[in-house]
Image: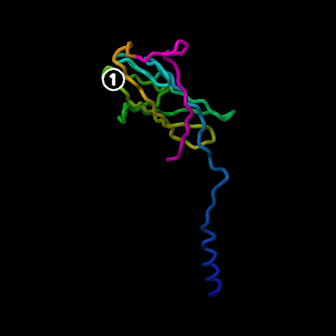
Amino acid sequence: MKKIIHLLMAALPLLCMTACSDDDKDLPAVDINIEYAGAKKIDGTIYAVAGEPFEITSVSCTPLRQGKKAAITAVTYGLDGWVLGATNLSPFNISIDTSELTPGKHVMSMSMIIAEVDCELATGYMAFDLIVVPTAEDLPDTAPDEDTSSGTGQFTASPDIQ
């Protein structure tokens, strides 16, 4: 009887072992597309003129894996470490009153929940410099062929588990 108890005690740790499953889901792999107005991209930096609203008019994503579908479900906006607001309604737009901002460099941030078919939910985060200038004349000089119109920006999200 003691041998059976010892055998069961020795086998107990084997019963408690777990292994990772082969069906663990990946994180989303997407490009995040941002459309904005009221700002100009010059030399890779976003500039806004004080007193003119800076708007992010749309945030969307495109899956990098062929045949997959992906979506953004919510976006939270921040400026200089302060939360400006959050929305879970597409197109996830926001308008920022630049007349209240001190001219100079500010950090605009966005965090978003990203969903992709057959993947775990993930949080994507991005931040970029937003430089507010007092007047349009204070915008930096540009090369003649440089496009400084308002429009779209794109970055590749690298979501991570937190």
In the image, 52: left or right of 61?
A: left
Is residue 45 or residue 34 the one in the foreground?
45
Q: Which residues are magenta?
A: 139-162
Q: Position of residue 12 (x, y in %)?
A: 61, 73
Which is the main secondary structure of the residues drawn in magenta?
loop
Vertical placement of 63 versus 42: above or below?
Answer: below
Is residue 101 or residue 20 the one in the foreground?
101
Which quadrant of the structure image shows residue 49? top left
Is residue 44 or residue 98 the one in the foreground?
44
Q: Secondary structure at mark 1?
A: loop
Amino acid type, mark 1 = Pro
Residue drawn at the location 62% of the way across and 46% of the way down: 25
Q: Position of residue 77 (x, y in %)?
A: 42, 31
Vertical placement of 26 versus 17: above or below?
Answer: above
| Quarter placement of the N terminus | bottom right
In the image, 38: left or right of 122?
A: left
Quickly name the residue at label 1.
103
Q: Position of residue 118 (x, y in %)?
A: 63, 41
Q: Find out whether residue 158 is within the magenta segment.
A: yes
Residue drawn at the location 36% of the way across and 33% of the way down: 80
Which quadrant of the structure image shows residue 97? top left
